[in-house]
Every structure is written in structure tokens, then in C-alpha cells.
Image (tube, rainbow, N blue to C red):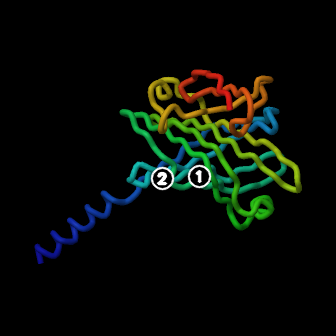
Amino acid sequence: MKKLFMTIAIAATAFMATTASAASYTDQLTIYLDGQEQDPQEATINITDNGDGTANFSLADFSFAIFEVGDVNVTNVKAVADGSVTAYYYEGEASLPDDKMVANALGHKVNVKLYAVVQGDKAYAEISLPVEMGGEKLDVDVVFGKKIESAINGVSAGKTAPASVFSTTGARLNSLQHGINIVRNADGKTIKVLK
């Protein structure tokens, strides 16, 4: 009988060690529609550590202007840890829920560029979601929380994670364009890039 309980205890401990951990962060979310700042709103980001150097992100119940999008979910985001700080960077597709009209119009997916930093119980994130509906393109950029200065210095996902790309006129771009681009990296450094 002791052997059976010991086996169950060891199996339960092993299961808990391999199970992903999750955390929720609630803070102010500022939305920019084509560069125009909207009124901040309270929002929640859920981050689930997959235990393999990646994490899953969810911007819960996201909405902008009159549009209810629902949860914006990004899976397998690369995580780079440095002490008590973890930085995340992702550029690719995010999934949207089945039960929202806007999500349905977007085909339940949207391209995103995500940069986030977590330190203790604080999270900061910049997310770009260019939205195309009915032949119209709308640049939706969101900033979650307050920038964690101590976390950004020296921590980046991959190389130096680009936080933002701008044209020479200062307009925010979704990616590098032909010609001269101004790139602000996650560490705050700005460089000019010729493509």
C-alpha cells in the first residue's frame, strides 16, 4: 500500500512539474487607431508559460471604437528570461474567437506584432494589429501597462527586438518598407535601416 501511495505521489509531482504555469495581468490599455490615441481602458493579458521557452498570450475581451473583437490569442511566443525579467517577441498570426462578428469578418485571425516584458507582478506590452475589412486598412496599435525600464535594458528576444518601425515622416509602419526606415528597438535605441 505504501508503494502505491509513493508511486501516486511521485507521478503527481512529475505532472505538476511539467504543467504550464499561467499568470494574469490587469492594467490600462491605450489604443491608437491610425495613430490617433483613444481613451484608455482597463484590460487583461493572460500569459501561459509552456515550459519549453515559449508562452501563449491572450489579450482578453479586446475591443476598439465600436468593434468587439474578443480574445486575441497568440501561441508559442518566444520567451527570453534574464533573472526576474522575461521578454517576449512575436510576429505572425493571432487567432480570434468564433462568436464575435468582427472576428468572423476577419476570418478568425489577424497578423500581429507583439513585444512584451514581464517583471514580477507587472507586465508591459506593445501590440500592432493591422486590420483589413471591406478593402479598408486600419492600423490598430495598443500599449498595455507602463514601460518597465529596468527590464528592457539588456533583454531582448532573439537579437535586438524591434519595437516600432517608422517612415522618414514619422508615420508608424507595420514592417520595413522600400527606402529609409527608422527602427526603434526594444532597448530604446533608434537606427536607420535602408531596404
Residue 58 - label? 1
| On screen, residue 14 above or below 31 | below
| On screen, residue 107 above or below 180 | below
Q: SS of the residue at dot 2? A: strand
Give how far apart the Cα atoms at labels 2 and 1 are. 9 Å
At which x and y percent is residue 158? Answer: 47, 38
For the C terminus, the quadrant is: top right
- Please state which amino acid type lies under the numbered disc 1: Ser
Residue at x-position 68% and y-position 63%: 97
Residue at x-position 79% and y-position 32%: 37
Q: Which residue is mark 2?
A: 48
Position of residue 167 in the picture relative to residue 85 (left or right): right
Residue located farthest toward the bottom when viewing the structure as drawn: 1
Give neighbour class at mark 1: few <14, some 14-19, many 20+ (Cα, 10 Å): many
Residue at x-position 51% and y-position 31%: 160
Position of residue 12 in the picture relative to residue 42 (left or right): left
Q: SS of the residue at dot 1? A: strand
At which x and y percent is residue 194? Answer: 67, 28
- Please state which amino acid type lies under the numbered disc 2: Thr
Dot 2 or dot 1: first in sequence order is 2
The reply to whether callout 2 and callout 1 are in contact (CB within 8 Å) is yes
The quadrant in which residue 116 appears is top right
Give neighbour class at mark 2: few <14, some 14-19, many 20+ (Cα, 10 Å): some
The quadrant in which residue 128 appears is top right
